[in-house]
Each structure stands twice: as structure tokens, then as C-alpha cells.
Amino acid sequence: RMPTSSKDEPDLIILEFGVNDYQGQDHLITIDHKTSVFFDGFRDLILCAEVVIHSLLNKYPNAAVVFLEMQTAIVTRKTGSLLHLGVAQHYQIPVISYSEAMFPDFFRLIHLLEGMNNESAINGRLEGTVTYSFKDEEWNLENGLGNNMIAKNGQNVTQYASALLPYPHGCSPCQPQHIIPQFRAGGCKSICTFLERSGLIHNKKLKCNADQGHIPPGRSECFVPFFAHDAVHPSAAGHGIVTDLIVNTLATAELRTCKGEYFPRPDIM
């Protein structure tokens, strides 16, 4: 409930339904093998988004409305973000994109790991496969918060240690104790597993299971700290990043307004 001082009228409304607003549930896209954003019924989703925006702007004329567009770790799964952009443009609704903020470095990390694939072959036993692992010596333990622990086979590292890219964009150690009980039994999911589920790699076989001996000695799996291990939701770190994006958007808009760089209309943040 809103405080009595608000008079039941919010100052800011954040709309986040891009992941589930693409034919109802995100996982159905993989099942149905949709290859185009413009499937039968996409107009209905656009209309629903417009109805929501129109209703909110009429009910709360003094409130700022923002689209927050998320993205899953399964990169081939489409979301409703593109369908929302037309509505956002028409009604001049700001859009905060988690994907635009996080995924350029996510794909950069994948590219770096691909470049290390030849190093992962041990005596040819993994020839023609991809593990998306990295050498243990790549751990940068001072990348996050000035940690200085010594890495031993990728195990004795702090939760803020990072490899290849700075935290939280690089590879991080598995932290199974932080996985919610519903998904803890499945363990941590690596970039290799996410790519396997995305169906992006066709010319080589992915070997992603460390428990089955797929990861060569002296190497570590790459876990991304801002994804939950169900591959759909953000982790606690991911939610923190979302909060920072929202705060930064609000602060930047206020600063630009104070400097006279732009003057929003009453219905625009």
C-alpha cells in the first residue's frame, strides 16, 4: 500500500513484463520454434501494452511511467521488448534496457572463451568440442573489491573474484549456497550450459558437465554472476544491477533537467 501522503497516486510506475509478454510464457517460444517476432497474435500483445499505458496515464496523470525490459540467459528466446518499443515511442515512455546494459559484455565474454577453446583440448581427448572454460591462472582476485585470496584450482576464490572481464561482467565462482532451494539441486549453470540450451553452437559439440569430467584439469567453468541458475531470472546481483539502472535513469533525467538540457512534458519522465 502507498503511504497516505501519496493520496493513492504513485510518483513512478515501472512496467516489467517483457519476458512473459511474448506469447504468454517465455519458454513457449523455444517449444514453438518461433523465428519471427511478428507471429500470429503479436498485434494483440501490442494492443494490450498500449491499453496498460493509456489506462495508467489517464488514471495517474502526474506519475512517470517507465518500461523496464529484461532478458533471459537463453539468448535465442525472444521477449516482448520490441513489441513495446512502438508503444513507448508513441506515448513518449522511457525504456530502461537490462539487455542493452549487460549483454554487450556477455557476448564479449563468450567471444573470449571461444578464443580459448583450443587450449582446452588435453591430448586431443576433447578435440572438436567446446567447454567454454578458462585456465585457473586467469582468476583476477582483485577485480571486484580488492580481494587478495589465493586461487587453487578455482576453488579458494571469493564470491567477488572475476576472470577475463571485471566483476560482474566476467566469469565468477559457483555459489550454490545462494541458489534458492527450488533450483539448488540442479547446481550452478555455466555459460556453456546457457549456450547449449540456446542452440547457437552447431559446428562443435558442447561439453558442459564438470561432474562428468568434461572440464580439463587446471581449468574452471565460467559462471555469470548476474544470471540466476534457472536461466530465466536475474540473480541477486542482477536485481541489484536493475536497481542501479533505475536509480541512474532517474538521477540522469533530474540532472539534465536541472542543467536545462531538456524539459520533459508532464507525462514524460
Image: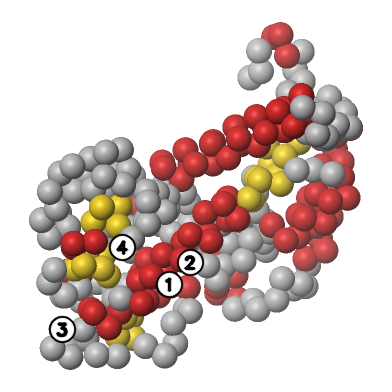
CA gap between label 3 and label 4 equals 18 Å
Quadrant of the image containing the N terminus = top right
Residue of label 3: 122
For marks 3 and 2 on the same chain, the one whose residue lies earlier in the sequence: 2
Q: Which mark is residue 222?
A: 4
Quadrant of the image containing the C terminus = top right
CA gap between label 3 and label 2 equals 26 Å
For marks 1 and 4 on the same chain, the one whose residue lies earlier in the sequence: 1
Pick the residue in front: 121 or 237.
121
Mark 4 and mark 2 in contact (Cβ < 8 Å)? no
- Mark 2 is surrounded, within 10 Å at the Cα level, by few (under 14), some (14 to 19) or many (20 or more) other residues, namely few
Callout 4: SS: loop
Residue 55 in the image, given as x and y percentages of width and height:
85, 37
CA gap between label 3 and label 1 equals 21 Å
Question: Which residue is found at the position 58% from the left and 40% from the top?
Answer: 245
Residue of label 1: 111
Question: Which residue is found at the position 41% from the left and 69% from the top?
Answer: 110
For marks 2 and 4 on the same chain, the one whose residue lies earlier in the sequence: 2
Q: Amino acid at mark 2?
A: Phe
CA gap between label 2 and label 4 equals 13 Å
Q: Is residue 147 above or below residue 50?
A: above
Residue 137 in the image, given as x and y percentages of width and height:
18, 62
Residue of label 2: 107
Q: Amino acid at mark 4?
A: Cys
Callout 2: SS: helix
Callout 3: SS: loop
Mark 1 and mark 2 in contact (Cβ < 8 Å)? yes
Residue 251 in the image, given as x and y percentages of width and height:
65, 29
Pick the residue in front: 209 or 201.
201
